[in-house]
Image: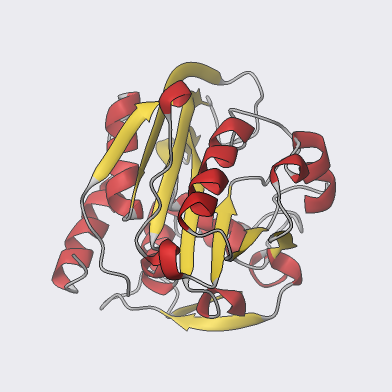
Amino acid sequence: MPAATETVQQAAVADFCYTPPPAAATARRILVKPNLGYPVGPPVTVGMPVLKAVLTGLRQVNPSAEILIVEGVCSPVSLSEIADRLGVRSLLDEGMQLLDADQLPQAQYPNHLPHPTRFDSLWAPQLLTEVDCRITVGTLKQTSLQSSPLISASLKNLYGLLPRDRYKARSSHSRGQLHRPSVPLVLRDVWGCIGHLFDGAVVDGSWRYVSPDWKPDRAKAGQWLGQVVWGEDPIAVDRQACRAAQFDEPEYLQTLAQFRQALGVN
């Protein structure tokens, strides 16, 4: 497990210059997982200015690393088409690749939590263990699921790494099995299986997304916030993003912070 730190930075979008985690400087391969799951721009997906700043920051500290942008979509529209619509390819240099998480070889990741909620392990791309640095770049959303608010930021962003063919339910385009018994509870397992592997997290808080229901892809649900939050620990970053947006901090983030401390990941 990477050694997490509570140090979190926040800046206005216009002033955002990404400071990568130390692991990025010496990495041969870096995995960046941005929220690009829908064929809709901000606030539904990560804004290109923020993603560009992340990639630029990585290149500044490591000019030679292979940078792999990995996403698994939540839409009938393919990742390739989404990337074309959003302008992702214009950000990539010769050492960067866009990869569809659903098309990569998969591996099973054991849950490091002492008491898993539902999953003793989760499947995700084997690539997670083949890179030297992993960064999640999420948006800042509040939706409502089962009459309870759900915060989607850098940790929830990792759902896109979990293969739809294994975790689909009624819709083949989503991961419905990961909604039971509830997303906040399953997010504990996501952190216990793969979230703890991540060396850095960024939350694009350009927009404060608020949906009246469970739908995370309403193009007009955003309120301008103009902030970016980043650091080495997804839990700490998401907690600060909630404070910046004046969202109530979800219980699962508090619980995971306690789990992390108990496991000695500090």
Viewer-closest of 87 and 160: 87
Report x, y in % for residue 64.
58, 64
Horizontal arrangement in the rendering, residue 205 relative to residue 52 (left or right): left
Q: Is residue 7 above or below residue 166?
A: above
Q: Is residue 184 above or below residue 25?
A: above
Report x, y in % for residue 148.
40, 37
Work out whether residue 89 can be spotted.
yes
Quadrant of residue 229 in the image? Answer: top left
Report x, y in % for residue 126.
60, 80
What residue is shown at x 71% (from left), y 74% (from top)?
104
Quadrant of residue 225 in the image? Answer: top left
Viewer-closest of 64 and 193: 64
**In which quadrant is the N terminus drawn?**
bottom left
* Coloration mode: secondary structure
Horizontal arrangement in the rendering, residue 77 relative to residue 126 (left or right): right
Work out whether residue 141 can be spotted.
no
Q: Is residue 17 above or below residue 256?
A: above
What residue is shown at x 57% (from left), y 55% (from top)?
33
Horizontal arrangement in the rendering, residue 210 relative to residue 160 (left or right): left
What residue is shown at x 55% (from left), y 80% (from top)?
130
Viewer-closest of 48 and 141: 48
What residue is shown at x 35% (from left), y 28% (from top)?
11
Viewer-closest of 28 and 193: 28
**In which quadrant is the C terminus drawn?**
bottom left
**Count of marks, rendered view:** 0
Report x, y in % for residue 23.
39, 66
